[in-house]
Image (tube, grey):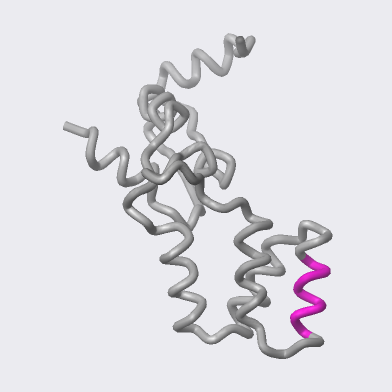
Amino acid sequence: MIDWPKSLIREIGRRRAFVFLGAGVSSSAIHVDGDSPQTWGEFLSAASELITDIAFKKEVTELIARKNYLLALQAIKDHANPAEYDNLINKSFNNPNFKASPLHESILDLDLAIVVTTNFDKIYENYCQHTST
């Protein structure tokens, strides 16, 4: 059980709060075959295989090991074949067979005015479109 601060409950009730969704929310989704979306580290490790320059790939691998994920992603995007990179993004995250989790449902139930996400996937967005009336 979470002990929510009364001030936060009040702000949510007045629709003056927002939620920022990250990879942790996405990872709670389940694919119809039972898998979940990749974590940041898993995706970046797979994406680093798109880099053909061995020395640069080593630098990216070190960034991933240090959990400097945003810089690693930018380096991968800048040095990978754009078509292969886009294909990996779509294959990894934009599969419509990822089903929203109870966490996605709870976030929607908060009835917030704003929900922000920088996630590659559209799991929450798809869930909202299919449940909104």
Residue 74 in picture, x, y percent from top left:
64, 73
Residue at image position (51%, 37%) is 28
Instruction: Look at the picture and state if 120 lies above or below 85.
Output: above
Residue at image position (32%, 52%) is 96
Residue 53 in picture, x, y percent from top left:
72, 90
Q: Which residues are magenta?
A: 56-63
Residue at image position (81%, 77%) is 59
Magenta-drawn stretch contains 58: yes
Task: Pick the quarter of the image with the C terminus.
Answer: top left
Instruction: Look at the picture and state if 9 lies above or below 24.
Output: above
Magenta-drawn stretch contains 43: no
Examine the rendering and report whether any part of residue 20 can be seen: no
Front residue of 128/20: it is: 128
Q: Main secondary structure of the magenta part?
A: helix
Task: Pick the quarter of the image with the N terminus.
Answer: top right
Q: Is residue 65 left or right of residue 126?
A: right
